[in-house]
Image (tube, rainbow, N blue to C red):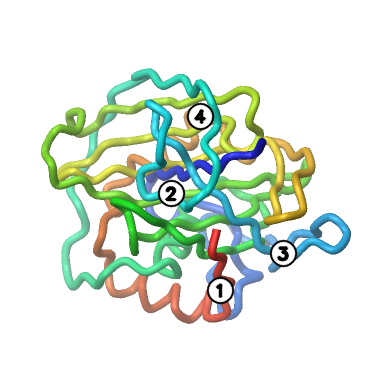
Amino acid sequence: MVMLVVIGLAAGPLGFGADDAGQPGGMNVGSPGGVVDSATPSPSGAPDDAPGGFVDGSGGNPRGAPHGPVSATPSTRVIDTVRIGAGPGGDLLTTTPQGALELLTRLLPKGKTGGYVNLQSSGAGAGMPYIQLHLDRGEGPGMVRLSIYQDRLGDNPAPGTVELTEIPDNCVQNEMVTVYHRDGLQIDVMISTCLFWEGKGTSPAPPALSVDEAIAIAANPTWGTRLPVELVASGAKNFASLARSNG
């Protein structure tokens, strides 16, 4: 039974990431060249979007995740503490899924990206960006999902705390890295070992990121419920036709 797990994370300096020249009007960030596929082939008859979600470390209903069955026995542990730098200055706008994808593609390792999807979140994280893409680093596309979540209850771990949630028997939510930021913000990044299409099952896929790479992405201080104007504007242009899934 496939369960959905939302993840999120941020890290790595701006300007170092995957080639996104294949996006409409996209920028070639991080390294020259590189062609980005706008879609990843899906199993016969399957749509190109891939909804899903994340479960929190205690199981039960996911934090900000789409509705769906919850995988059993997730294992969560603290694996590191990282420094969270100062957030972005200047004019900021409310974070959009397109803006979040713009930032994520800049932070990814070099590779071809595609399969961009805006996934539906629910519960405490309703309305906050929950996004997906595929990253091909030369061994075929792997799936990455990222969510932005903010808890105002004040009982989160200290900023910089890094958690790893593992569900070995679930390829969609195989590993999730959570980095806690200031003001109750957390970024979850999910590393899948398959591609998943709603109602069509899964197909094996290589992990697109290592745990360390996911930590670097999730710990980037640019993440937040508000992003620099340039990121939001570029995302609106480069991902104007972003697919929406109801998860």
List x then y, in percent, for residue 230: 33, 74
Mark 1 → mark 4, Cα distance in angstroms: 27 Å
Residue at 62% from the left image edge and 69% from the top image edge: 21
Whether the residues at callouts 2 and 3 have beta carbons within 8 Å, the answer is no
The residue indicated by pointer 2 is: 65
Q: How far apart are marks 2 and 3 (CA)?
A: 20 Å
Mark drawn on residue 211 = 4
User: Which of the two marks, 4 or 2, is nearer to us in this view?
Assistant: 2
Residue type at tag 2: Ala
> Relative to residue 230, is residue 219 depicted above or below?
above
Q: In this view, does 234 lie to the left or right of 224?
A: right
Report, in whole angstroms, how far the alpha carbon at label 3 lies from the one at label 4: 26 Å
Label located before the other in sequence (4 or 2): 2
Type of amino acid at the residue the image marks with label 4: Val
Residue 177, position in %: x, y? Answer: 43, 33
As shown in the figure, which amino acid type bears the numbered disc 1?
Answer: Leu
Q: What residue is shown with label 1? A: 242
Find the distance from the CA under tag 4 to the CA under tag 2.
21 Å
Q: What residue type is labelled 3?
A: Asp
**Cβ atoms under marks 3 and 4 closer than 8 Å:** no
The foreground one among 182 and 170 is 170
- Identify the secondary structure beneath mark 1: loop
